[in-house]
Amino acid sequence: MPPEKSPQSPVPSGQKVLISNDHGEKLVGLLHQTSSKKLVILCHGFRATKDDSILVDLAAAFTAEGISAFRFDFSGNGESEGEFQYGSYRKEAADLRSVVLYFSEQKYDIIALIGHSKGGNAALLYASQYSDVPSIVNISGRFALERGIDGRLGKNFMQRINKDGYIDVKNRKGEFEYRVSKASLEDRLSTDTLLSSRAISKDCRVLTIHGAKDEIVPAEDAVQFAANIPNHELRIIAEANHRYTGHEQELTSLVLGFVMSRLRSTSPLRPKL
């Protein structure tokens, strides 16, 4: 299976910000500050980082429109502290909560959470638990979390992990990449995307974007999000893959258009501290 991780893009300048999560781990991010206190928060996918090209492009697009942007590494990824975990859906949503609270305390108006792939899942899971961000953009998130595992872990992964307690994932050269523990696999399999999707408030506007030729997460997952999230828009890009290769501008335009068109119609919502 092709990696979900992307080549990193040249990183535009931004202010480094350190935020502690609930475990006392430092989350590292870059704040692209404009004259506006309106802010979008950008979330990377599986084994990617804040320097993922999709996030870098989106940060540049929003700042060009005068909107501040923050992109960060989830715990155990990139520069952030913590141990990498295969599952960690709930922990990444909790990381995101720490980020939202930090910027709310700094008097920012958080207008959208935007995530690619697993980052989209984190943003949606956040929205199912809290009703303080008016817009969510889910780019190529996975609805059916029980699928796609054998592509990374190999066939008979459950028998192997039950026997050994873990699976070491290696690249095509046979080099070690990361370890999947039984607990982290169970975290993924016990994350109920159907329940969490239906729990998102109808006051939260959600956009799902997906490539029809996504080779990692099938486009049918996007249709399932659309069927279960109360206030949802769906955009399928006909020729796009998981990385939106050759369709980067179309992706950025859809995200930007969705968020910007709602600025006048949404009132700022802030977490209860």
Image (cartoon, helix red, strand yellow):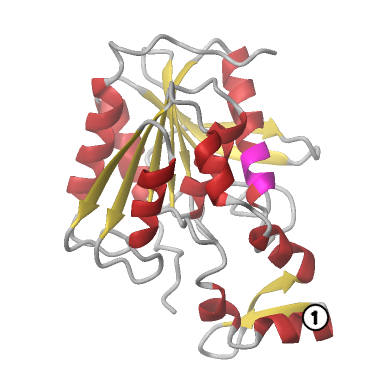
Q: Quadrant of residue 122?
A: top right
Q: Is residue 108 magenta?
A: no
Query: Which is more toward the observer, 6 or 125?
Result: 125
Please give the name of the residue rendered at 61% of the width and 85% of the height, measured from the top-left corner. 175
Provide the major secondary structure of the magenta segment: helix
Q: Quadrant of the N terminus?
A: bottom left
Q: Residue 7 in the image: state x and y as whole percent.
A: 39, 63
Q: Residue 66 in the image: state x and y as whole percent.
A: 29, 19
Please give the name of the residue rendered at 73% of the width and 35% of the height, measured from the top-left corner. 21
The type of residue carrying mark 1 is: Asn
Number of marks = 1
Q: Is residue 65 above or below residue 146?
A: above
Q: Is residue 119 visible?
A: yes
Q: Is residue 35 above or below residue 248?
A: above
Q: Residue 13 in the image: state x and y as whole percent.
A: 41, 36
Q: Residue 148 in the image: state x and y as whole percent.
A: 50, 72
Please give the name of the residue rendered at 60% of the width and 26% of the height, measured from the top-left corner. 130
Q: Label 1: few (<14), some or many (≥20) within 10 Å?
A: few
Please give the name of the residue rendered at 69% of the width and 60% of the height, measured from the top-left corner. 85
Mark 1 sits on what residue?
162
Mark 1 residue element: helix
Q: Quadrant of the C terminus?
A: top right
Q: Which residues are magenta?
A: 90-94
Query: Which is more toward the observer, 15 or 161?
Result: 161
Q: Is residue 93 magenta?
A: yes
Q: Quadrant of residue 68?
A: top left
Q: Is residue 236 left or right of residue 227?
A: left
